[in-house]
Image (cartoon, grey):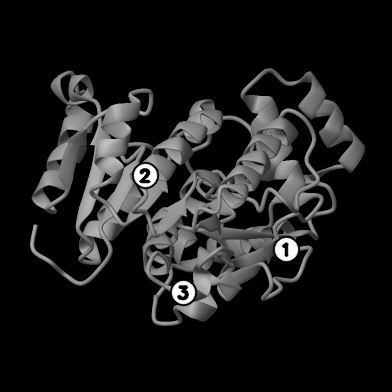
Amino acid sequence: MATTGKSRVLVIGGTGYIGKYIVQASAKAGNPTFILIRKSSVDSASPEKAALLQSFKDAGVTFLHGDLFDHESLVSAIRQADVVISAVGAAQLSEQSRIVAAIKEAGNVKRFLPSEFGNDVDRVHAEEPAKSVFEVKARFRRLVESEGIPHTFVASNFFAGYFLPSLSQPGSLSTPPRDKIVILGDGEAKGVYVIEEDIADYTIRSVDDPRALNKILYLRPPANILSFNELVKLWEEKIGKTLEKVYVPDEEVIKQIKESPFPESILLAIKHSALVRGDQTNFEIEPSFGVEGSQLYPDINYTTVSAYLDRFV
């Protein structure tokens, strides 16, 4: 791979939900890009995954065969990179300690970005079972800090592609409702919605930026900070219709979280944290601990919530 003057980026979990966007953004930005992947995963890939892997190859991504649970292969892969980005799923969050051990042994990493890509886990007030997941991420932050590993924590807030197609409604809606909508709490808490491609672009821009070193990179694009009531009004304006609104009081939402089966319970708890308690926006970003992506990189032409919803009109 030709030298570009940009950091060599290794993505662990690069075929996952957010990982694939990060791999694509890194390659598109001209970073020498690597993914850690099990050889068995390549050999037995589904048609969809095989197409994704081929798109990585076409973009010049280098495959490094290895495994999160194979220390030797992990160290070998990390030694080929300057920046390590973890995009592992929830089930493997606690296993990221293996990445820390490998980074320490490799001794060459100038930036580590753990698997976060959601709410700022140090500033949430979530109910179980989301509370425990956030605590795992917070403990891992403390490990990274205590080990003195240069890092950036990415607090991207809501994945637009996950929450906006259904307007965060229960069930499996693939388009926003046109008759009735359920609103958690009073609908006044402001959430932040960022499309996955933009999350990846902001993330990759930060890897060589000293302003984001040992900081939390928050994504709060101004046009995408909306209360749920504002989000509903925006959708009503687009379809030219007023929806029937069903408000669910805080205490009833908490009751539903406790009574819902997993994984519905954790999704509802995350929504409650952001959309009722306002955990994505109820604090100021202080320079001592954080920076905001759209301020650092105003040239990124992010997709607005309004533009995103246009595809469903």
Percent x, y of residue 293: 51, 71
* Residue 136 in the figure: left or right of residue 299: right
Mark positioned earlier in the residue sequence (1 or 2): 2
The kind of residue tagged 3 is Pro
Residue 17 seen in render: no
User: Which residue position is annotated with label 1?
Assistant: 281
Count residues near mark 2 (Cα–Cα under 10 Å), then give few for <14, some for 14-19, many for 20+: many
Q: Nearer the viewer, residue 160 or 207?
A: 207
Kindly state the secondary structure of the residue where label 1 is placed: loop
Percent x, y of residue 313: 46, 57
Percent x, y of residue 6: 25, 68
The kind of residue tagged 1 is Thr
As measured in the structure, the alpha-carbon distance from the residue carrying label 3 to the one carrying label 1 is 25 Å
User: Which residue position is annotated with label 3?
Assistant: 210
User: Which residue position is annotated with label 2?
Assistant: 19
The reply to whether discs 3 and 1 touch (Cβ–Cβ < 8 Å) is: no
Q: Nearer the viewer, residue 47 or 87?
A: 87
